[in-house]
Image (cartoon, grey):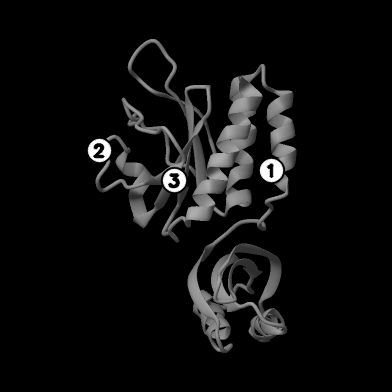
């Protein structure tokens, strides 16, 4: 089984190598490493996808990583595939190729976003219909089911974090299992892209900015 472990690690020679050795010692196989953010104190937040044998528990991975001086485990969760931010280029090309077939273009978007942004699911909603009901255009495989509880209004003018506890328009199913949520408008289209991380971790400001850039680019392609 594969897990995505988010860790804070010193930005120093040999740190990543020592971490990789500790992960390997417990049977872990690193599938991808992605730098999420670099901080002024010379530490780095990394997303690392690790494949573990079926008889090894995730706690073993946490213990192995934490055994390295200066390493702090932020979160760990099951994750399919590997982090693939470069896949966004192919996705944008596919969106452009299918710009005249909106549903297919948006399905291309939500299929790639989970691996590109290390989220559990993605949904595109359309608020351009004549009636007040907001429709679901496309959804990733792991997205909450379309149970008819789509919001009747969407309070989104820019990329931002969503708070299901204080924002009544957010369907309850989106926030289950302590999911972290973020959203961006697809500029000029009347649509929004919602992403969720089941069980967290929370979205960083840099990740929200990244999501906003995706919204701007996809919106420009479609308009």
**Few, some or many C-alpha atoms within 10 Å of disc 3 (few <14, some 14-19, many ≥20)?**
many
Q: Are marks 1 and 3 in contact (CB under 8 Å)?
A: no
**Few, some or many C-alpha atoms within 10 Å of disc 1 (few <14, some 14-19, many ≥20)?**
some
Work out how far the residue at label 2 is from the one at label 3, CA to CA, in angstroms.
15 Å
From the viewer's perspective, tell me whether residue 9 is left or right of residue 202: right
Point out the residue furthest to the top here.
Answer: 130
Residue 71 found in image quarter: bottom right
Name which residue lies at 68% across and 86% down.
18
- Kind of element beneath mark 1: helix
Query: Which quadrant of the rendered structure holds the C terminus?
Result: top right
Task: Indicate which disc, 1 or 3, sits on the residue closer to the N terminus.
Answer: 1
Label ID, residue 182? 3
Residue 38 position within the rendered picture, expressed as x and y whole percent measured from the top left: 59, 67
Label ID, residue 168? 2
Residue 43 position within the rendered picture, expressed as x and y whole percent measured from the top left: 58, 75
**Above or below, 26 relative to 103:** below
From the viewer's perspective, tell me whether residue 151 is left or right of residue 114: left
Label ID, residue 107? none
Q: Report the residue marked by disc 1.
A: 88
Name which residue lies at 35% across and 48% down.
175
Name which residue lies at 54% across and 68% down.
6
Name which residue lies at 41% across and 48% down.
181
**Above or below, 223 relative to 193:** above
- Kind of element beneath mark 3: strand
Residue 134 position within the rendered picture, expressed as x and y whole percent measured from the top left: 39, 23
Q: Is residue 99 visible?
A: yes
Work out how far the residue at label 2 is from the one at label 1, CA to CA, in angstroms.
32 Å
């Amino acid at each position: 089984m594969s897990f995505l472990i988010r860790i804070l690690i010193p930005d120093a020679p040999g740190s990543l190598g020592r971490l990789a050795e500790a992960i390997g010692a417990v049977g872990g196989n690193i599938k991808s490493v992605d730098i999420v953010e670099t901080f002024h104190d010379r530490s780095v937040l990394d997303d690392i996808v690790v494949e573990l044998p079926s008889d090894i528990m995730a706690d073993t991975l946490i213990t192995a990583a934490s055994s390295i001086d200066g390493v702090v485990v932020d979160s760990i969760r099951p994750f399919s595939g590997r982090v693939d931010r470069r896949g966004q280029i192919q996705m944008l090309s596919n969106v452009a190729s299918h710009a005249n077939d909106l549903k297919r273009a948006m399905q291309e978007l939500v299929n790639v976003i989970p691996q590109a942004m290390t989220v559990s699911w993605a949904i595109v909603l359309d608020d351009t219909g004549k009636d007040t009901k907001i429709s679901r255009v496309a959804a990733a495989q792991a997205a909450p089911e379309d149970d008819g509880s789509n919001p009747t209004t969407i309070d989104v003018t820019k990329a931002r974090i969503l708070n299901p506890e204080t924002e009544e328009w957010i369907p309850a199913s989106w926030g289950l299992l302590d999911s972290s949520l973020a959203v961006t408008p697809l500029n000029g289209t009347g649509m929004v892209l919602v992403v969720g991380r089941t069980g967290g971790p929370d979205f960083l400001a840099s990740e929200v900015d990244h999501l906003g850039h995706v919204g701007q680019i996809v919106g420009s392609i479609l308009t």
